[in-house]
Amino acid sequence: MLRRRSGRAGSVRAPVLYAALALFLVSFTLLHYGFYNRRLILDTHEYHRYGLAMVAGDIPYRDFRVEYPPGALPTFALPAIGRPGFARFNSDFQILMGLCAAAALLLMGYALQALRAPPTRLAAALGFFALAPLPLGSVLIYRYDLWPAALAVGGLAAILADRRRLGFATLGLGLAAKLFPGVLVPPALAYVWRTRGRREALICLACAVAALAVVVVPFLVLAPHGLWTSVQRQGSRPLQIESLGSGALLAAHQLGGLHLKMVTSHGSQNLSGALPDALGTVESVLLPLALLGIWAAAALGPAKPERLVRYSAASVTAFVAFDKVLSPQFMIWLLPLVPLVRGRRGLAASVLLGFALLLTQLWFPLRYWDLALHFAAFPSWLVLARDLVLLALLAVLLVREREPEAARS
């Protein structure tokens, strides 16, 4: 009987996966046409420069400065093989990101299979991801964030499927590519500790550290000063213009004429002055406090797979919402995680995430320079609205479920 059920479930899952991949291909292709292709703001110029330098034999962090972690470097080097011009590099980079997105979608399906999700839930989650490029826009194909996003959901999926050590090693690789997959490690560690014991949890943690070390240690040996400078540079960034604190200041500027000053540094546009610096400090304190609270709640509650998914999504949402830097591409991090959440909570969270994606595209890239250079009213209010929607999303993910009467009695 179990084999028959499993066979029927597999026969349902395959068409859903194929349909989601086809739908994603259509969405991804549409990003190259119409208003999606206007006033583009590209990071791929910088990626191209990095890739050509690596192909020529230069050592990152030693021979040239890199603002990204070592795990990001393959996404710059692979499209630069053969030393192509920018147009070819840009095209090949987009293909690479499309492959990362397809991998993320398949790994979402793997995670939902481990959760024994019914076909309707599978179709809804994968359909959301497949259509997400349309409300988010062109930022999806000109940033490398789909790579760490795929690693994050891949690590979570492996842990849910009881391939725990592989899952933690994948999260370690994700942490080497971008910081945010690391916030999934504490709730996952608590889950393994509660379900498989302390020894297995420590082995899993060692797998994550080993994977991180494989990527990072060679650059620590070859270019310790350059690597440390890169980390220090990212840690000292000021209040970026799209962050939650900046959203409040932009609203005060529109309502009360608060004087604001924009400075370009650290590869972004930021607010400068005593008040923005103070709000940046507040966010720097609030972010770890929020994460510690989420991790504690995850560790103290029942060790169930669905709770691990929910608190993993909440951890990344908090990281996005409370960081003093909130670039548009950070929304990509949420795409493969939030739709995995179960039930009405998951539906509400996905609706809020979709709204946040749309609000982001309404100013980026079309109205970004109106915001950064002139503090224009419309994009200023959009920034605040998007950041408040992210807070609402976090609240939906964290609100406690009501226990059934039988459980309470």
Image (spheres, grey):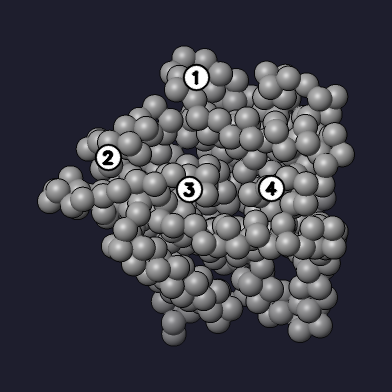
CA gap, disc 1 and disc 2: 23 Å
Which secondary structure lies at badge 3? strand
Which secondary structure lies at badge 2? loop
Q: Please name the residue that numbered disc 1 is placed on.
A: 37
Q: Earlier in the sequence, mark 2 or mark 4?
A: 4
Q: Which dot marks residue 82?
A: none
Tell me which residue sits at (65%, 56%) in the image: 230
Q: Residues within 10 Å of mark 2 (few under 14, many from 20)?
A: many
Percent from the top left, x then y, of residue 103?
72, 40
> In this rendering, is residue 165 above or below 20?
below
Q: Quadrant of residue 129?
A: top right
Q: Is residue 144 visible?
A: yes
Percent from the top left, x then y, of residue 375?
27, 40
Tag in front: 2 or 4: 4
> Does residue 144 appear left or right of residue 255 in this picture?
right
Percent from the top left, x then y, of residue 376?
25, 36
